[in-house]
Each structure stands twice: as structure tokens, then as C-alpha cells.
Amino acid sequence: MTTMTGDHLATVRIKNLLLRAYIGIKEEEINNQQDVVINVTLRYDASAAIDRNEISAALNYRTITKQIIGHVDGNSFALLERLTHEVLEIVMEHHAVQWARVEIDKPHALRYAESVSVCLEAHR
């Protein structure tokens, strides 16, 4: 087996995480949960995970997903921008994450549109 040296920058994608939250400013939105679709893309140095082949050496994306679910599901947010920012903060709390992008869709938020989304990025 060939061993490579140097950084192995891994891209992890959490795709189409479907949750329900109270999101919006209209009375109907405040009183009724709506679907939100969350997509997270992040990068971290996976060299240790590749070399050791152990979960303890990898970024635990299951933990990140559970944190997002706990923060979003069933909770209230006025603005999609704020919700996106808060989810990005959860991802960036994990110090191994070097860069992340969070995009959150609010399906059927606008007439004739499939969805509206907000996308934010952060890096260290």
C-alpha cells in the first residue's frame, strides 16, 4: 500500500437535511411549522483519518448533523438569513473545519418559485 504525505483536504457534504421550523414574519409563518432544507459543505484535513482509519481521527459529521437538528427542528426564526448564520456557527464550532458553506432553502416561500435560499460561508 502506498502512503502519501501531506494534507488530504476532504470535502464533506450533508445533503438535503429536511427539518421543520417556525420561520418567517407573517402570522401564518409564526404559527405553522414549515419545511426547511439544509445543505452543508465543509472542508477539513482528513490526513489523520486516512492514516489511522479510526473514527476518533475523523471529523464526526454525525455529531454536527445532530447539533443542527437540535437547534433547528421545531424552533422559531424570523429570518432565513439568521437561521443560516446560526447553522454556519454550529459547523464552525468544530475546530477541524477549515471552510464551510451552509445553504438553507425555504420551499414554496414565493409564488411560482420552487424555493428561496440563503447561502453563507466561513473559513479560518
Image (tube, rainbow, N blue to C red):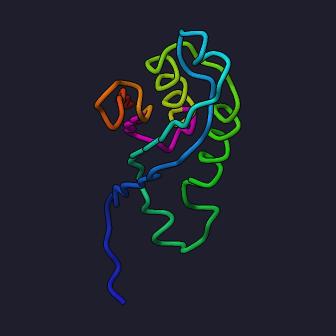
Name the main secondary structure of what is drawn in magenta.
strand
Q: Position of residue 35 (x, y in %)?
A: 54, 37
Tell me the magenta residue range. Answer: 93-105
Near-viewer residue (117 or 64): 117
Residue 77 part of the magenta segment = no
Q: Quadrant of residue 114?
A: top left
Near-viewer residue (32 or 36): 32
Residue positioned 39% across, 46% down in the render:
41
Residue positioned 39% across, 38% down in the render:
100
Total marks placed = 0
Near-viewer residue (34 or 49): 34
Near-viewer residue (9 or 18): 18
Q: In the figure, is residue 100 to the left or right of 82?
A: left
Q: In the figure, is residue 123 to the left or right of 52?
A: left
Q: In the figure, is residue 15 to the left or right of 95?
A: left
> Would residue 69 be visible to someone looking at this image?
yes
Quadrant holding the C terminus: top left
Report the residue that reaches farthest toward the front: 112
Q: Position of residue 68 (x, y in %)?
A: 61, 38
Residue 94 part of the magenta segment = yes
